[in-house]
Image (tube, rainbow, N blue to C red):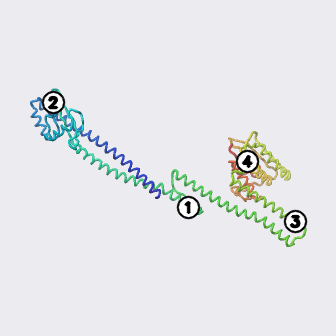
C-alpha cells in the first residue's frame, strides 16, 4: 500500500476511534443532562400547581376540589401523605398506582422509579407545608427522555459523519501534499542511480522534507563531481603512466635493434632508469593517495610539537634551498602542539615547501601562529603564483601548474590535511607569489 493511503487510513482509523469514544461519552452524559433538565421542569410545574392550590384551596375539606383540579391537569402525579405513608390521589389508574407502590419506596428519595420494565423520572413538591405532610410527586417516563436522547444523538451522528468526511478529505489533501514531494524525490534518486545528473530537478517542499531534498541535491552534486574527478583521474593517470612507458619502450626497442651507437645506448639506458624512477614515484604516490582515501587505520594520530615538525621540514629542504641560492625563513610561535600523524603531516608540508622552493625566485617563508583557537601554517614564495582559474582544481589529482612534476603532491597534501580535520587553500602572497594556507581547529 502506498504511503499516501497508509497515512489516510491511519488518520481515518484514529478519527473513528476518537468519534466512537466521544459519541459514547456524549450519549451517556446527554441522558443525565436530560434527566436533570426534566426534573427541573417537573419541579417548576409542581411549584406552579402548589402555588395555585395554596391560593385557591386553603383547607383539608377542599381535598375533593383539589382532586378535581388535579384531574384536569395532563400530568402524571401522585398526592402522597408522608405521615400516613399512603397515596391519597393519582391521575393514573388504581392498577398503575398499586404497581408503583409495590415496586417503589414512596417514603424514600429515589429520583428514578420503576413500573414493570419502564422507568420514570420523579420530582417531589410539598403541598400545604404549614399544616400537613402532603406531597405532589410528578413523573415523566424515561421513554420520552430516551426519544429526545436518540433524536439528539442521531443529529450528532449526522454532524459527525459530515465532519468525518471533511476531515478525511483534508487528511487526503494534506497527506498528498506531504507524500507528493517524497514521490518526486524518489524519481530524482532514480536519476542519480542511473547517473543522469543533468536531468535532476529541484523539488518544492517545506520543513524536514526540504532539508532532505537539499541534502539529496547536494549529494548528487558531490557524487557528480566525484565521478568526474575519478574519470579525470583515470584519464590523467593513464597519460602520466603512458608517457614514461613509451619512452622506456622506445629506447629498449632501439637498443635491441642496435639502432643507437654505443654512446647513445648509454644515454638511452640513463633515460630509461630516470623514467623508471619517475614511474615508481607516480605509482607510490597513487598508492599513498588510495590508502589515505580508503584506509583510516593508515593514519595514526599523536601529539605533535609544531616547532620540531617545522625544524624537520627545514632540515630536509635545506639542500635544495642552498642549491637554488634562495633564502628560507621560518617563524613558529612557542608552545604549539597538534594532534596528527607526524610522518604523514611532515610529508604534506614537505610537498608544499618543495613546491614553493621550485617556483621561488629568491625567497620562501614559513609562518606558524595561533589565533582564536585556530592553528595556522602558511607557506609563501615570491614566484609567479597560481593562476586564479587553476586554484579551484590545483589540489585535484594530476592537476599540474607550470613546471609541475607528477601532479599528485598537492593532492596528497590535501588528503593528509583533511585527515587531520584541517583545511588547505591557496591565494596570493605578499611576497608576490603563492601562499598555501593550512588551518587546524585546536
Of the two numbered discs 2 and 4 on the same chain, state the one appearing first in sequence: 2
Q: Are marks 3 and 1 in contact (CB under 8 Å)?
A: no
Q: Earlier in the sequence, mark 3 or mark 1?
A: 1
Instruction: Determine which of the numbered discs, if any, sits on residue 267 in the image.
Output: 3
- Label 3, label 1: how far apart the Cα atoms are: 58 Å
x, y (%) of residue 107? 20, 32
| Label annotation for residue 59 | none
4 vs 1, front mark? 4
Q: Residue furthest right?
A: 262
Pointer 1: residues within 10 angstroms few (<14), some, or many (20+)? few
108 w.r.t. 377: above or below: above
Along the line of sight, the residue nearer the viewer: 180 or 404: 180
Please identify the quarter of the rendering in which residue 334 is found.
top right
Nearer to the camera, 67 or 53:
67
Distance between the alpha carbons at the discs numbered 4 and 3: 42 Å
Q: Which quadrant of the figure contains the C terminus? A: top right
Measure how far apart labels 1 and 2 are at the Cα level: 94 Å
Q: Position of residue 170 (x, y in %)?
A: 41, 53
Residue 150 position in % (x across, y down): 27, 48
The answer to which of 369 and 223 lies nearer the viewer is: 223
What residue is drawn where x is 51% and y is 59%?
184
Where in the figure is residue 85, as x and y percent of width and height? 17, 31
Q: Which residue is mark 4?
A: 341
Q: Residue furthest top?
A: 131
Q: Which residue is mark 1?
A: 190
Residue 43 in sight here = no
- Image position of 30 with respect to 276: above or below: above
Q: Is residue 152 above or below residue 286?
A: above
Dot 1: what SS? helix
* N-term mark: 1 or 2: 2
Q: Are marks 4 and 1 in contact (CB under 8 Å)?
A: no
Amino acid at each position: 500500500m502506498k504511503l499516501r493511503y497508509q497515512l489516510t487510513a491511519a488518520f481515518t482509523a484514529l478519527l473513528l476511534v476518537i468519534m466512537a469514544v466521544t459519541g459514547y461519552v456524549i450519549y451517556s452524559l446527554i441522558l443525565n443532562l436530560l434527566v436533570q433538565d426534566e426534573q427541573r421542569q417537573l419541579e417548576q410545574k409542581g411549584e406552579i400547581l402548589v402555588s395555585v392550590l395554596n391560593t385557591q384551596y386553603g383547607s383539608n375539606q377542599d381535598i375533593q376540589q383539589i382532586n378535581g383540579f388535579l384531574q384536569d391537569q395532563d400530568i402524571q402525579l401522585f398526592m402522597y401523605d408522608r405521615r400516613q405513608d399512603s397515596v391519597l390521589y393519582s391521575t393514573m389508574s388504581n392498577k398503575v398506582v398499586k404497581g408503583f407502590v409495590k415496586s417503589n419506596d414512596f417514603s424514600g428519595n429515589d429520583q428514578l422509579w420503576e413500573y414493570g420494565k419502564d422507568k420514570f423520572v420523579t420530582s417531589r413538591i410539598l403541598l400545604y407545608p404549614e399544616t400537613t405532610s402532603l406531597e405532589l410527586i410528578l413523573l415523566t417516563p424515561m421513554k420520552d427522555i430516551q426519544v429526545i436522547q436518540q433524536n439528539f444523538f442521531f443529529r450528532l451522528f449526522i454532524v459527525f459523519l459530515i465532519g468525518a468526511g471533511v476531515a478525511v478529505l483534508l487528511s487526503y489533501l494534506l497527506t498528498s501534499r506531504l507524500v507528493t514531494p517524497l514521490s518526486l524525490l524518489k524519481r530524482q534518486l532514480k536519476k542519480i542511480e542511473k547517473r543522469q545528473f543533468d536531468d535532476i530537478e529541484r523539488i518544492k517542499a517545506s520543513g524536514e522534507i526540504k532539508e532532505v531534498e537539499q541534502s539529496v541535491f547536494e549529494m548528487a552534486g558531490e557524487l557528480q563531481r566525484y565521478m568526474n574527478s575519478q574519470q579525470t583521474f583515470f584519464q590523467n593517470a593513464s597519460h602520466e603512466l603512458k608517457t614514461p612507458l613509451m619512452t622506456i619502450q622506445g629506447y629498449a626497442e632501439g637498443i635491441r635493434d642496435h639502432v643507437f651507437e654505443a654512446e647513445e645506448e648509454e644515454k638511452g639506458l640513463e633515460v630509461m632508469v630516470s623514467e623508471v624512477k619517475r614511474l615508481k614515484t607516480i605509482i607510490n604516490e597513487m598508492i599513498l593517495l588510495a590508502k589515505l582515501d580508503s584506509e583510516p587505520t593508515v593514519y595514526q594520530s599523536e601529539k605533535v610539537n609544531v616547532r620540531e615538525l617545522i625544524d624537520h621540514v627545514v632540515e630536509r629542504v635545506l639542500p635544495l634551498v642552498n642549491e637554488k641560492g634562495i633564502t628560507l625563513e621560518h617563524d613558529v610561535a612557542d608552545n604549539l602542539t597538534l594532534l596528527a600523524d607526524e610522518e604523514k603531516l611532515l610529508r604534506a608540508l614537505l610537498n608544499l615547501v618543495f613546491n614553493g622552493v621550485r617556483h621561488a625566485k629568491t625567497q620562501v617563508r614559513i609562518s606558524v601562529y595561533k589565533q582564536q583557537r585556530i592553528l595556522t601554517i602558511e607557506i609563501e614564495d615570491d614566484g609567479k603564483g597560481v593562476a586564479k582559474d587553476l586554484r579551484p582544481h590545483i589540489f585535484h589529482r594530476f592537476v599540474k601548474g607550470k613546471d609541475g612534476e607528477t601532479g599528485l603532491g598537492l593532492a596528497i597534501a590535501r588528503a593528509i590535511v583533511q585527515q587531520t580535520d584541517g583545511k588547505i587553500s591557496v591565494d596570493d602572497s605578499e611576497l608576490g607569489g603563492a601562499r598555501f594556507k593550512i588551518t587546524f581547529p585546536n
